[in-house]
Image (tube, grey):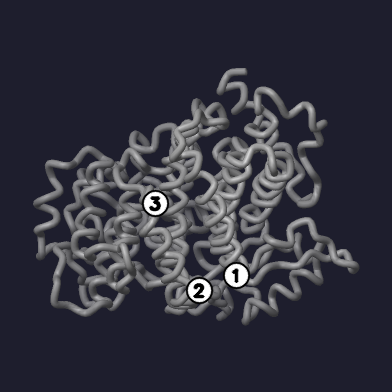
Amino acid sequence: MTTASVLCGVLFSACTKNFEDINRNPYDFNENELMPDMKLLGEPLIQTMLNIMVSGDPATAQVQQNLIGDIFSGYMMTPTPFESNRNNSTYDLLDNWNNHAWTVAYGNVMPNCKFVQEKSKGRYSDFYAWAQLLRVAAMHRVSDVYGPIIYTKYTTINKDGSIDYDTQQEAYNAFFNDLDAAIDTLTVYAQTNVPSNFAAFDLAYKGDYRQWVKFANTLRLRLAIRISKADPVKARKEGEASLQHPLGLLTTAQDNFNINIGAVAHPLYVICYKWNDIRMGAPMESIMTGYHDPRLPCYFASSSSRDSSYDGIRNGVSITSRDTYTGFSKLSMAQLGNKIQLMTAAEAWFLKAEAALYGWKGAGDAYTDYENGIRTSFSQYKLDDKVNAYLKNHGYKPKPYTDPRNAANNVPDSSPYLSTITIQWEHGVSTEKKLERIITQKWIAMFPEGEEAWAEFRRTGYPRLFPVVVNYSGGSIPTERFIRRINFPQLEYATNPQGVKRAVAALGGPDNGGTALWWDKQ
């Protein structure tokens, strides 16, 4: 079977699966049918990779991520007044949008990983570890959207018919346990240089065990940094385990964790160019034009509204006609190509830089890590000749934002929401100032991965973003605090009412977008 036919079969399954049935095993095969070609272990994990962010169905990807993390991160904004402009962008959260991150996870990630672990346990430990790792890669994103999730108790049905959630702290502890086990197993395979059992199914690293260990170490460090305020002792332990692992982290742009989607159109291409539903966000315009950042044309096309300019839309503004902002800057799709970018090596360097601020063993020097993060990002876009001048600049800072369509949306130079952080590293400033510089550059380098950028903004408050102008939350999401999470899907209230009731109690606040997650101490 060709890669194309595998992808077609997987994507057809992804589009037709009943998402709401989270307990049904989608692969009911005889044990003897698993071998010898490994397809019945490998193909479910192809589907898992393709559904971390749905690549074959732009309509699902749009509501799974684009109209959540991509806009809340400040990367993008929609010019379309969906639902008469009462939608996620104006904090009138839409249940029919916001259930998709959940249903994709429990329709196309958890059952596939469970199946592979059940069938490979004790026989193909590399497949078992790979499923563990992919499950964490997908499910931490789900937890970072909602908070408590069904993870360790998946398919464990109580007497009352409910399924229990893990608190977010419990989920994160389980993530670390799974990563620890997967790293140990895959490290053995990497160090013995045995041929890969899953090369034919690997859409990221072509079966390279060493690369998967480097990714797993970096993911472990990402999650350790994520909880550094909520549980600093656990964070240090997990972070230092990652930093001191002999196979290391993602280091160069060639190490980036990208999912190859083949001939399938990139969902952001369809959303931006076919549907005209997404454009540059105002913070991207402010920060990248203010820095005269050479990566800007790699991220966005110049505006068709004004010659040789980049125009971004402020999040949560009044839009009465989709014609108002459609001429603003589209995404530059040449750099996205046929891959879904989920983690960059540049991020790994910025993670190390922050770990160095906290004195974690193995993190190195924050200044060196910071500069390496920027260098690695520039290298990703083949801009190595421009990086030294960028690193040495100490005058450029984000520009005030001017909306040429509506002056009420402007962010003037005096605004507290306009960052004054510059590029060049400063040794003598406060730790908080160093953190703002690190996270601002990390935010630029992670584009277009909005889920992670939104999580980091909530955790740190950086980069400084512009609050919404129009807030239809009825006060449940304070404008000055920004949105902190997405409420649990209504289908959970319908199918698992007792489980979700206990999850809300564990959340520590009402089930709305204003309640902070466990790790969100900003």
Measured from the top left, where is residue 319 in percent x and y? 46, 59
Q: Which residue is mark 1?
A: 168
Q: Residue at x 67, y 68 (%)?
A: 166
Measured from the top left, where is residue 167 in percent x and y? 64, 72
Neighbor class of circle 1 (other Cα within 10 Å; few <14, some 14-19, many 20+) is many
Q: Earlier in the sequence, mark 2 or mark 1?
A: 1
Count the numbered circles shown. Answer: 3
Question: Tag 1: residue type?
Answer: Gln
Q: Which residue is mark 3?
A: 325
Tell me: 309 left or right of 517.
left
Q: Earlier in the sequence, mark 3 or mark 1?
A: 1
Measured from the top left, where is residue 203 in percent x and y? 50, 34
Mark 1 and mark 3 in contact (Cβ < 8 Å)?
A: no
- 400 or 257: which is nearer to us? 257
Helix or strand or loop: what does disc 1 sit on? helix
- 299 or 402: which is nearer to us? 299
